[in-house]
Amino acid sequence: MNIFNLPSKAFFLAPLAGYTDLPFRSVVKKFGCDMTFSEMTNVNAIAYNNEKTKRMMQKSALEKPYFVQIAANNTENAKKAVEIINEIDWIDGIDINLGCPVNKARRSGFGGVLLKDENRDKLRDIVKTIVDTSKKPVSAKIRLGYDKSVVEDRAKLLEDLGIVFLTIHGRTVKQMYRGKADYDEIKKGAQAVKIPVIANGDITDYEKAKFVLEYTGAAGVSIGRGAVGKPWIFLEMKQEGNITPEQKKEVILEHFNQMINFYGDYGVILFRKHAHAYSKGLKKASEFRSKINEEKDVEVVKNLIEEYF
Ligand SMILES: Cc1cc2nc3c(=O)[nH]c(=O)nc-3n(C[C@H](O)[C@H](O)[C@H](O)COP(=O)(O)O)c2cc1C
């Protein structure tokens, strides 16, 4: 990709609110992931200096390039938020969320609802404000459309507004996570523009990544749910080797330690969903999960992880 010296076929970690926080990204980066994004942050929270949001914008040592993802429902706070981000030197760029399908986002008018035809002007104004205000490169992440695909039109619009690359999740907003990602529509989006397009949706192994890259002509792929419980997936995606059971255990422990460093003791609670994901398909997983769910003590949980994996 012709940005930040990324490889010609790049592998990104998709933002997953509640999962791809700094501790998780710091682990993923050890396995060849080319680019990372913060979890979605809201421009209103950034503009009002919300402490939790400030922490969400931090990055770990290996993350470069690192973009903060923002969601905006008005130009005023979008401008204020971008002015704040302009002054934070470790942030390499801004990714605009134009796909979030959750009810709260739809009601407040940010994320995927901006892909509706009636919101096309609003989408243009918000993205233009962000691009014009930002001193850093700006990318966007869209779904195919709100209830039907408008991917070519919106891809072109975003390119004209100065977006440097575009990630396309091959579902509509209304679909949420139902059905399959539509790679024909992603291909149409990729063919409609000159900027790099990153294909996203249901890519969970090397064969699928290879197929999607070839089929859509995308410049890269973005992997979300496939990395949860498997932060080493990028090794496999890039065919750079396999991970041994001993290494897996080390990675899981490191992830846990990073969670405690970042969140303090509350990291024990936040790690539970990851412990569930790591134990998926393993013997006696339900027994392990029950124990993890009840325990709040950092050392006890560490021992449980040591014993189980
Ligand atoms: C729990 C969860 C949280 C997500 N949070 C975000 C987010 O903060 N920003 C975003 O652009 N997409 C978010 N997404 C969408 C993913 O980035 C991605 O587009 C989608 O999961 C499809 O890719 P996958 O099949 O590789 O997971 C989220 C998805 C899930 C399941």
Image: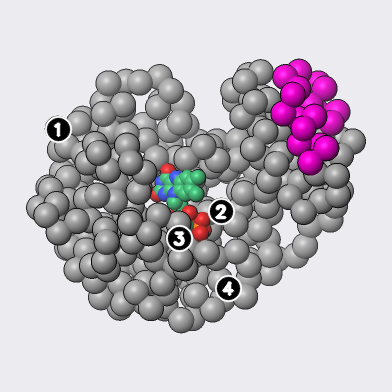
Q: Amino acid at mark 3?
A: Arg
Task: Find the residue positioned furthest to the right.
Answer: 307
Vertical position of residue 43 compared to residue 124: above or below: above
> Do the residues under discs 4 and 2 have CB atoms within 8 angstroms?
no
The residue to which callout 1 is attached is 76
Q: Looking at the picture, how far across and down is residue 146, in whole percent?
A: 26, 58
| Mark 3 neighbour density, 10 Å: few (under 14) some (14–19) many (20 or more) | few
Name the image quarter holding the N terminus.
Answer: bottom left
Disc 2 on helix, strand or loop? helix
In this picture, residue 247 sits left or right of residue 14: right
| Chosen colour scheme | one colour
In this picture, residue 144 sits left or right of residue 273: left
| Mark 1 neighbour density, 10 Å: few (under 14) some (14–19) many (20 or more) | some
Q: CA distance from mark 1 to mark 4?
A: 41 Å
Residue for point 86% across, 39% down: 308
Q: Which mark is residue 40?
A: none
Q: Quick one: 160 or 146, which is closer to the camera?
A: 146
Count of all numbered marks drawn on residues in the image: 4
Q: Looking at the picture, how far across and down is residue 228, in whole percent?
A: 62, 49
Q: Which mark is residue 178?
A: 3
Q: Which residues are magenta?
A: 286-304
Label whose residue precedes the other's in the sequence (1 or 3): 1
Label whose residue precedes the other's in the sequence (3 or 4): 3
> Do the residues under discs 1 and 2 have CB atoms within 8 angstroms?
no
Task: Find the residue positioned furthest to the bottom.
Answer: 215
The residue to which callout 4 is attached is 208
Q: Amino acid at mark 2?
A: Arg
